[in-house]
Image (cartoon, coloured by chain):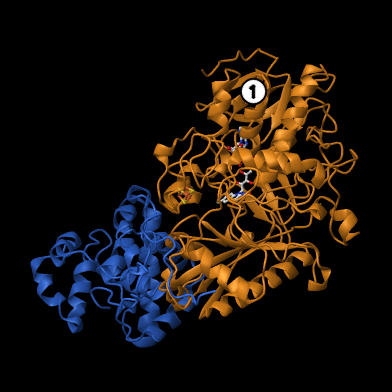
Chain colours: A orange, B blue
Amino acid sequence: MSKTFSKDDNSVVVIIGSGAGGGTLADELTRQGVDVVILEAGKHHTQEDFENDEWAMFAKISWLDKRISAGGWHHTETYPNLPAWIVKGVGGSTMHWSGLALRFMAHEFKTRSTYGHVPGANVLDWPISYDELAPYYEIAERKMGVAGTKASGLPPMPPNNHYRVIEHGARKIGYKDIVRPVASNTRPHDGRPACQQIGYCMQGCKIGAKWSTLYSEIPRAMKTGHAELRPQSMVLRIEHDKSGKATGVLYADKDGNQHLQKARVVCVAGNSIESPRLLLNSASSLFPNGLANSSGQVGRNYMNHTTAAALTINPGPVYMYRGFDIAAVVSDEVPNNPDRGFLGGYHLEGLALHLPFAAAFMKPGGWGREVSSALEKFDHMSCVWVCGEDLAQEENSITLHPTERDQHGLPIPIVTKTDHTNDAAMRRHGLAQWRKLSEAVGATRVIDMPPYPASHNMGTNRMSEKARDGVVNKWGQTHDIKNLFVSDGSQFTSSGAANPTLTIVALAIRQAEYIAGAMKRREL
Amino acid sequence: MNDDLHQSPAAQEGMRVLEKRVTVSRRAFLKGSGLTAAGVTTLSVGGLMLPARDALAAELTHLGAAIGKTLLVMARDIFPHDKIADRYYMQAIEPYDAKAAEDPALAKLIRDGVAQLDAMAKASFNTPYADVGTETQRLSLLYAIEHGAFFQKIKGDMVTGFYNNKAVWPLFGEEGSSWEKGGYINRGFDDIDWLPKA
Ligand SMILES: Cc1cc2nc3c(=O)[nH]c(=O)nc-3n(C[C@H](O)[C@H](O)[C@H](O)COP(=O)(O)OP(=O)(O)OC[C@H]3O[C@@H](n4cnc5c(N)ncnc54)[C@H](O)[C@@H]3O)c2cc1C
Ligand code: SF4
């Protein structure tokens, strides 16, 4: 019952991007009777297209338009044109995501108050608290079917080999808070089947047990008769009238033809590189520095978590890829405990790789027996991903390239990131703890890996109480333009130590409530 | 450089482990490898591997057998797995032949790169790179060129050309696509048996 809206229909909410943020927003708005047009740059894949093949899926669904890595981080060397790992397609990165659905801790919303002034960083409190978001976390966990949570009622994900090796080591070194809240069905739920432990979750779940807006929120929105999805529609700029109100968006279809879709409200959910890029590219004589950028914070404070990874060679076989891709997650290091030599905390997350990615990520650029001897023990490996708080810094940013243009004629984005000393200390601590954990199981070798291309991208249109400190208010509404919203992870004021998606979904549910209400009250 | 990988199975009661060896029949292998009958007789004897290697290298009809052999030895030196047969390395090298035929810049990169490597080998060891006697000697040559475009290209392509070749996966204990087999829910996702009881 998909609906078609006229391009001149200025009563619709236009949602840019159909991933965690945009897909959820579409579902929640249409549920309340609001008409939406979803513009998605990528193709509309189905589960038919999913393959249990890491590189094939990477090539099929990744955002591969050119980007440049700049700054002091490792990616300028290891992944010079792939700073981030993001999906281009209906469902966005929820196709690739590995399903770990963690909540922020209360103090992570109040980092400025908790940490005090941090030299070299641009730390700020969120204008909302954990308690304000908690009810929406509940709804999100239910919606996404997060296994092992009270809200969903789904049983926990059964431990696989990889989980058990990590859990064993963790307990031996005294860790107690070992969790695994993953958004995959442990029994049939929401019209989707139970997880079969296929183990290619990051390649798109072939059977749809793992949550993705591709087959949950988007089809549900379409069924209401209030939504139109236009895939292969890349939004180029957001238009506004003389009073500074957003009036619609200009987009290019798959043949490069440009269209103008009018709108009552515009919501940007293109993930934290494309969203600020779009606002910057929408600069006009009224807004010469880009839309919603009176604070100068659009594109700034780019965070992608303090991450590191390591492969461990265990004394016996593990076959880490058998079963759900997220293994045990150690949360003991999440609380803020400055005695460790850094602010904030981190998770140790078991995350399985298959052989091709293990070979590619273990030591990018490496060769020789150092690499090959480790890979011969692939079947004995376990793998960790350290995911910790990344402090906002103004210079870490998305900016526009002065000369280089993409296929649409738009300046390509430069992604600049330099570690804060806090990040470096945390990364070292995380890898050392993982080594201890591994050795407690009898590991014969632990290989530290550089961070992967950033899969968590946040902060580039951040929320702030005051208009001068950030881009959006506590509803994700831009401080400068009333009917322009940001609905993805770029709203994050701090990164926390939690993987971002559950929080993105919770914020989108809350934002939808606000938008639908404000439209009814004719405030929008 | 044995024909197949033979590793004592890590089999322990209970856990479903892979033997990390090739299971294709010899017949299927010979057919698939494109070897002539003449090459076959020399294959079974480990000490007489060189003719088999030459036969593999000769598959590069455009770039030629000499370049093929150099690339093959280089590929082995870049990601050495002693128990994995030459033909798996050759599968990563072989696509260069067709690509070089269409891409003059690539053909030049490879021809010049091999020529330089051979010149260095002759200067130091009086023999082309592929015939340099020890791995340590060959590595001394590779370290000298490892930052150059030729080495970077071959090494970069090997990461996927070799490790993303489904034929080598079983040799590492990688089982590959599993959805069509019903995942691992009944095939050992939780069968680890060597951890001490908690
Ligand atoms: C391999 C991998 C594993 C991950 N694992 C986890 C995990 O375990 N837990 C977790 O919480 N998170 C995980 N993530 C991160 C998670 O996927 C993202 O945080 C989340 O999907 C971001 O949501 P979003 O709405 O901001 O953007 P996305 O989901 O990326 O969606 C953005 C969409 O907008 C589209 N778009 C962009 N620009 C435009 C434009 N101009 N016009 C039209 N459309 C546009 C894009 O094509 C894309 O489809 C993972 C990510 C990856 C890549
Ligand atoms: S392990 Fe479960 S969630 Fe992951 S791909 Fe398989 S069925 Fe889907």
Could you say where residue A266 lies in the image, as x and y percent from the top left?
72, 26
Local packing at callout 1 (Cα closer than 10 Å; few below 14, some 14-19, many 20+) is: many
Left or right, A486 with respect to A381, comes to right
Q: Which residue is mark 1?
A: A30
Left or right of A167? Residue B60 is: left
Q: Which residue is rendered at x = 66% and y = 31% of the image?
A: A25
Residue A175 x %, y %: 67, 70
Name the secondary structure under disc 1. helix
Residue A274 visible to the viewer? no
Q: Would you place residue A206 above or below residue B37 in this image?
A: above
Rendering quadrant holding ligand 1: top right
Quadrant of residue A151 within the rendered picture: top right
Q: Is residue B154 above or below residue A86?
A: below
Q: Nearer the viewer, residue A204 or B184?
A: B184
Q: Is residue A18 above or below residue B80?
A: above
The residue at 74%/58% (across/down) is A389
